[in-house]
């Protein structure tokens, strides 16, 4: 899906990403050259080069000197490189959020403790995310009361609602300070009933559980997200750099 005002290189990268996911370049078929893509899409070679650079960084394509650019062997999986809060917000560029359970006020002692709240009451919302109409993750988000109350009636969070939004993008306008940090833990866990139902796998199926605790610049938690990713349809990739 193209977003108005989106940079040309990102629109081209998203278009190529969709074509690769659809199998256009499967079986060793070479992607068009920089020159060919520049002519086809009416952009500069620098724009094409930047799009290729992003796809290479994500592991979606690889370049073979003297031969060209080819799709990597990640058939059927959603692959996104994550290295910043902005990357997490950009999940909306090529995935869809579908609400399973709308925001509700409830008691959750464990989540409240992780959010360092003075009360056990908070708001919880759950959704699944889809890529090319295929669900690949089920997420439960816990929000402090002040934040949850502000977005509880948002149409994007109504039961069954589908949109290209992210939770960070929806809640951040209601925060006094922006989210600047996400502490993450990754484990393998059996699929609980809600996750299994949402992504269409067997109860207890091995899944990738990713917990993220988002905080502002004062280290105050503003969101706790617990996600269960279906490994058959998802690849996690991160690049570490020395400062």
Image (cartoon, rainbow, N blue to C red):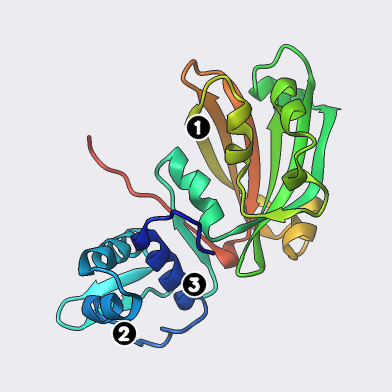
What secondary structure is marked by label 1? strand
Which is nearer the eye, 34 or 117?
34
Q: Which residue is mark 2?
A: 30
Residue 39, placed above or below residue 152: below
Spatial CA span between label 2 and label 1: 39 Å
Query: If you read the primary sequence from the N terminus, does the residue marked by circle 3 or circle 2 appear first?
Result: 3
Q: Residue at x 26, y 42 (%)?
A: 241
Query: If you read the primary sequence from the N terminus, does the residue marked by circle 3 or circle 1 appear first?
Result: 3
Q: Which residue is mark 3?
A: 18
Q: Quadrant of residue 63?
A: bottom left
Residue 184 pos. (x, y %) = 51, 37
Give the position of the N terminus as an image quadrant: bottom right
Residue 127, placed above or below residue 220: below
Q: Quadrant of residue 147?
A: top right
Q: Residue at x 36, y 61 (%)?
A: 8
Residue 117 pos. (x, y %) = 69, 16
Q: Which residue is mark 1?
A: 183
Q: Residue at x 41, y 88 (%)?
A: 27
Q: Residue at x 76, y 58 (%)?
A: 198
Q: Quadrant of residue 44?
A: bottom left
């Amino acid at each position: 899906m193209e977003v108005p005002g989106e940079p040309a290189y990102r629109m081209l990268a998203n278009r190529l990403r969709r074509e690769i996911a659809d199998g256009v370049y499967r079986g060793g078929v070479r992607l068009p050259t920089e020159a060919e893509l520049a002519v086809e899409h009416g952009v500069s070679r620098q724009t094409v080069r930047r799009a290729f650079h992003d796809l290479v960084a994500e592991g979606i394509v690889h370049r073979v000197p003297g031969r060209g650019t080819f799709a990597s062997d990640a058939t059927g999986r959603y692959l996104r490189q994550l290295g910043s809060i902005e990357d997490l917000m950009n999940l909306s560029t090529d995935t869809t959020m579908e609400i399973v359970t709308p925001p509700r006020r409830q008691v959750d002692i464990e989540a409240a403790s992780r959010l360092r709240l003075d009360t056990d009451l908070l708001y919880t919302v759950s959704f699944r995310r889809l890529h090319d109409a295929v669900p690949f993750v089920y997420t439960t988000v816990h929000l402090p009361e002040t934040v949850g109350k502000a977005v509880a009636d948002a149409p994007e969070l109504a039961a069954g609602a589908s949109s290209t939004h992210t939770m960070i993008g929806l809640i951040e306008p209601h925060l006094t300070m922006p989210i600047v940090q996400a502490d993450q833990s990754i484990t393998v866990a059996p699929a609980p009933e809600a996750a299994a139902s949402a992504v269409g796998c067997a109860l207890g199926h091995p899944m990738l559980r990713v917990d993220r605790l988002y905080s502002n610049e004062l280290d105050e938690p503003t969101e706790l997200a617990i996600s269960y990713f279906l490994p058959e349809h998802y690849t996690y990739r991160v690049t570490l750099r020395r400062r």
